[in-house]
Amino acid sequence: MIYIVGSVVTIVAITFAAAWFGTSRWPHRTQRWQVTFSALSVPLLSVVLFAAAVLATLADAPAVPERGTMGMVIFSMVFFLLYAVVAGFVVGIPTAMIAVRTLRR
């Protein structure tokens, strides 16, 4: 339960920070553009962190004596990526709409 609450709080914080950045950096853009920018922040950050984790895992692969263990690690990271992207959209879209509407005033 604490994992879900922590995920929601993190997604709200990142989305609100992206909304603040988008509205302060590009105030002339439309509200729809700013909401889209804010809502995509968590899924894009998840993809970047996933790529970094996979590259770090593959870079460490020659040091592992057993063959085939890296596949399970990357497989578990794929499930984390799917969770992060779906949770980012489910929580991020309403948060982005509320945050951009609040910050544009």
Image (spheres, rainbow, N blue to C red):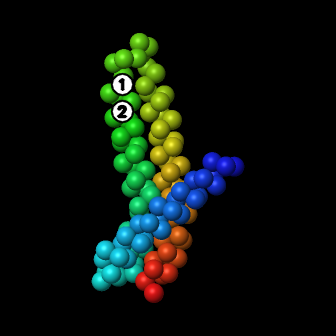
Q: Give coordinates of residue 25: x percent, y percent.
A: 31, 74
Q: Residues within 10 Å of mark 2 (few under 14, many from 20)?
A: few
- Residue 22's spot in the image, x, y percent? 36, 72
Q: Position of residue 33 (x, y in %)?
A: 36, 75
Q: Position of residue 51 (x, y in %)?
A: 36, 42
Q: Quadrant of residue 30?
A: bottom left
* Above/below status of 93 relative to 8: below
How much space separates mark 2 and mark 1, taking CA atoms?
6 Å
Using the image, determine if residue 60 lies above or below residue 86: above
In the rendered view, does 25 fall on the left or right side of 95?
left
In the displayed orientation, state which residue is furthest to the bottom. 105
> Image check: 71 left or right of 58?
right
Q: Looking at the figure, which quarter contains the C terminus? A: bottom left
> Residue 41 sits in which quadrant?
bottom left
Task: Report the residue at 43% width, 50% height from top.
Answer: 46
Type of the residue with mark 2: Ala
| Image vertical order of residue 73 relative to residue 31, above or below | above
Name of the residue lying farthest toward the top: 65
* Residue bearing mark 2: 56
Note whether residue 48 is visible.
yes
Q: Is residue 33 visible?
A: no
Q: Count the marks: how many? A: 2
Q: Which kind of residue does numbered mark 1 sit on?
A: Asp
Q: Residues within 10 Å of mark 1 (few under 14, many from 20)?
A: few
Q: Please name the residue that numbered disc 1 is placed on.
A: 60
Q: Are marks 2 and 1 in contact (CB under 8 Å)?
A: yes
Look at the numbered disc 1 and give the secondary structure of its residue.
loop
48 horizontally vs 86: left or right: left
Which residue occupies the foreground of this view, 7 or 78?
7
Q: Secondary structure at mark 2?
A: helix
